Image (tube, rainbow, N blue to C red):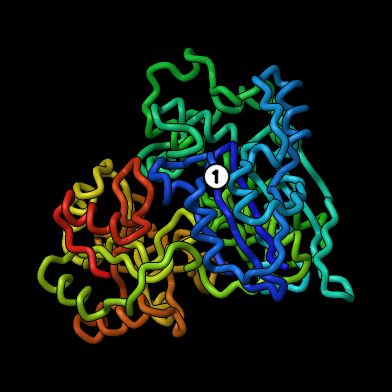
Amino acid sequence: MNYIGISNKFHDAALTVIDDTGNILFAGHSERYSKQKHDSELYYDLAKDAKQYCNDIAYQIHYYERPLYTQLRQLRAGQKIDFTTAKNRIGKDILKLFGKPKVVTHNHHLSHAAAGFQTSPFLDATVVIVDAIGEFDTISIWHAEYDTNNNAQYKKLYSQKYPHSIGLFYSAMTKKVGLKPLDEEYILMGMAAYGTPRYQHDMLNLIHSLKNLEFNTNLHIGVDENFLVNAFDMDIASSAQELVESMLRIIMSKAKNLGKSSNLVYGGGVALNCLANRMLGEYFDKIWIMPNPGDAGSSLGAAALGHCKRVHWRNAYLGKNIDGKYPVNDILSVLQTDKIVGVASGRAEFGPRALGNRSLLADPRGNEIKDKVNEIKRRQKFRPFAPVILEEYVDKYFTMPKNWNESRYMQVVAKCNYPDIYPAIVHADGTSRVQTVPKNGGGIRELLEKWYVLTECPMLLNTSLNIRGEPMVNDRFDADRFEMLYNVKVCS
């Protein structure tokens, strides 16, 4: 049996296939195929590509939420209601592609939880999910473990309901500073380093009870236009970030007290806030955040619920394949002459962050590199970049937060110990969103090893191979287009 997990119709549609032994055969994003950033529709070419990786046996389709409950919440909220069933949401052409299989629906937060727990190395865990909204849940805490038959079991310990939502609050502040909600929250996070949290008191006026995480207004469509008029955007960002971190501390403390395990599995879109993730180790001994913790990753969670047992997580390279050996020597050659190079090789990353297979890489030394890369990507100049580093050197160059011994998927920030030497990968607050590469780390590992021999520098600047507002490069055609339009060599 193949288990196909699908998430779509809200944002970031995705599809995952898991076989009956727990191997992830394929996981990819619609946006990479349709070329529409955050595409919410399930794209036929994505499903067609996924089928090429599947065994030609029976399929079950598992849908990441329960549409009926979503419709009930929309009704209560006075929103426009989408009355389509899960089958209609998936599309007749895609169902036909897989032989019109049975469709099973799952609770939205449970799909998040399964994406995290069943890919984790843990036998039991306290699972925390924080996002904008599920059917009704906006926060949930679970205990997860495997039974005697090795089936994953979940018990909900706590939940907060719509409209009380940390994710919707952060999106409302994103909209307030002129950015796109449900898209550019990561930019708001980056802006926080340039401001001061002077507006926390004003933001607390939106909250009925901080202890109970209850808001006194529905932030689904943002805040009133008169809220924080003439306030400095950077200070709004800093205040929002500080307040979110305060609320997450309340959640993590509650999870620690309610949970039976010192292992944390953390998911939902808010888990992408790598600045807030620094404090997770203060509450839990071991931490696992699946590299795609938002709604797209719930396609994997839904498929995992169908499989029931542990899923074999090896790495995030699960999408579209570009044939050929990782072009280590070609990349090194371009780096030594141009300082900046693109790479599009192997299978695309599943998740929002490039991890070496669809990356724009650069020498992190030198004051001019950051501005050059931001110019290529058409980004604001204040935006930071991430370092990718040989894992055994991370503690020498960065001060990692408590209980974060590695960060293989850019999930946490760390203080850089040598900001003057590596200015291209250090943000205004002195931190870097670190990606560590272990000894079995594939092509990017070999590249870093050879780069270190040449330069005595164990890291490179790593950002996604895309332009702001566009999805990451997916196939060779995309790579050629990027090279032609932006005059950057892309090695494959």
Q: Which amino acid does label 1 sit on?
A: Leu
Toward the right, the furthest residue is 148
Query: Could you tell me which quadrant the C terminus lies in?
Result: bottom left
> Is 95 drawn above or below residue 206 in the view shown?
below
Instruction: Using residue 167 as the reference point, say whether residue 241 is left or right of it.
Output: left
Toward the top, the furthest residue is 226
- Is residue 397 in view? no
In front of the other: 174 or 331: 331
Mark 1 Cα-neighbour bin, 10 Å: few <14, some 14–19, many ≥20: many
> Is 260 drawn above or below residue 72 in the view shown?
below
Q: Quadrant of residue 108?
A: top right
> Is 143 drawn above or below residue 324 in the view shown?
above
Q: How far from the left and from the top, in percent, is residue 380? A: 27, 41
The residue at which mark 1 appears reads as 42
Toward the left, the furthest residue is 337
In front of the other: 78 or 372: 78
Q: How far from the left and from the top, in percent, is residue 220? A: 60, 26
Instruction: Using residue 2 as the reference point, say whether residue 371 is left or right of it.
Output: left
Seen at 31% across and 43% down, the residue is 468
Q: How far from the left and from the top, in percent, is residue 177? A: 41, 28
SS label for mark 1: loop
Seen at 72% across and 47% down, the residue is 109
- Is residue 423 in view? yes
Q: How far from the left and from the top, in percent, is residue 488? A: 17, 58
Instruction: Using residue 473 as the reference point, say whether residue 4 is left or right of it.
Output: right
Seen at 38% across and 37% down, the residue is 195
